[in-house]
Amino acid sequence: MGQSATIDREIKNYELKLREVDLNKSRLENETWYFSIVDVISILTDSNEPRRYWSDLKIKLKNEGNELYDKIV
């Protein structure tokens, strides 16, 4: 099995997990779904504390002077 097939399988796995997310924290707008970043982090990292992971990531981005930080807070 090639790398592309592996990546496709992982993406489908993430899509399935996103469907299990609490839809009260998600919304559909113009045929596009928007999810809570904490829920996405939980799925992508298998973190037991996704809020802490997100908090630490924002601090790291700010300390590095990353422009993205200003757009996400």
Image (tube, helix red, strand yellow):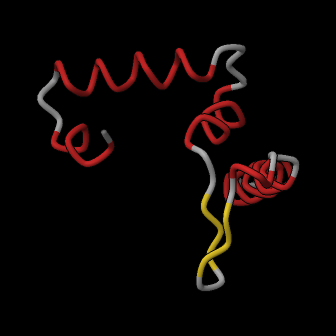
- In this picture, residue 19 sits left or right of residue 36: right
Viewer-side residue, 67 vs 72? 72
- In this picture, residue 42 sits left or right of residue 56: right
Quarter placement of the C terminus = top left
Give how far across and how far down residue 65 sits, in percent.
Answer: 11, 29
Q: Is residue 12 above or below residue 61?
A: below
How many dots with numbers? 0
Seen as rendered, the residue at the extreme front is 24
Seen as rendered, the residue at the extreme left is 65
Q: Is residue 64 visible?
A: yes
Q: Residue at x 17, y 35 (%)?
A: 66
Give how far across and how far down residue 9 sits, in percent.
Answer: 81, 54
Q: Residue at x 63, y 42 (%)?
A: 40
Q: Residue at x 74, y 59 (%)?
A: 8
Q: Is residue 41 above or below residue 62?
A: below
Q: Is residue 6 visible?
A: no
Viewer-side residue, 6 vs 16? 16
Give how far across and how far down residue 7 sits, in percent.
Answer: 69, 53
